[in-house]
Image: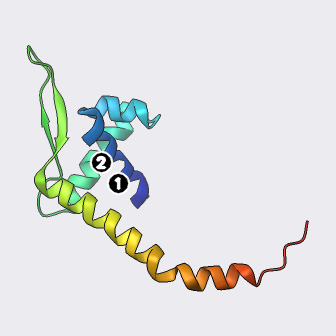
Amino acid sequence: MVLVKLDFLEAIDVCGSISSAARQMKMSYKRAWDLVDVITKSFKQPLVTTSPSGKNGGGAKLTKFGRFILNNYRYLVVKTYSATDAELTNIISNLTLSE
């Protein structure tokens, strides 16, 4: 579930709107807003800011803090893979693969 939320944050950042991000991720508009609500309530600061639709259109974007959280999580994943790569390679090389 964490990856869905982070992928959704990234989609908001790229698409510039919650509805576009939802379409890109093939999720309902309600599910998208529910995710934004859960994400918002999970942190001390907002990760997403929205502007109402109107003459200039609406939209959503990540706050500076939202981008900070997203980038830190992605960096954590890279560090985790780097730290465990040798061990996983060793385990995989010792597997017997049967068909």
Q: Nearer the viewer, residue 50 or 95?
A: 95
Q: Indicate the position of residue 59 as horizontal and vertical percent values.
A: 18, 30
Q: Is residue 38 above or below residue 94?
A: above
Q: Indicate the position of residue 53 as horizontal and vertical percent values.
A: 14, 21
Residue 61 shown left or right of residue 96 in the figure: left
Which picture quadrant has residue 15?
top left
Residue behind mark 2: 9
Q: Which mark is residue 27?
A: none
- Residue sitting at 90 percent across and 71 percent down? 98
Residue 43 shown left or right of residue 28 in the figure: left
- Residue sitting at 34 percent across and 39 percent down? 32
* Name of the residue lying farthest toward the left: 55
Q: Indicate the position of residue 27 as horizontal and vertical percent values.
A: 44, 36
Q: Which mark is residue 6?
A: 1
Which picture quadrant has residue 71?
bottom left
Q: Indicate the position of residue 69 as horizontal and vertical percent values.
A: 22, 62
How many residues crowd mark 2 within 10 Å: few (<14), some (14–19), many (20+)? many
Contact check, label 1 and label 2, Cβ < 8 Å: yes
Which picture quadrant has residue 18?
top left
Q: Which residue type carries mark 2?
A: Leu
Cα–Cα span, label 1 and label 2: 5 Å
Is any atom of residue 18 visible in this view? yes
Q: Secondary structure at mark 2?
A: helix
Q: Nearer the viewer, residue 74 or 63?
A: 74
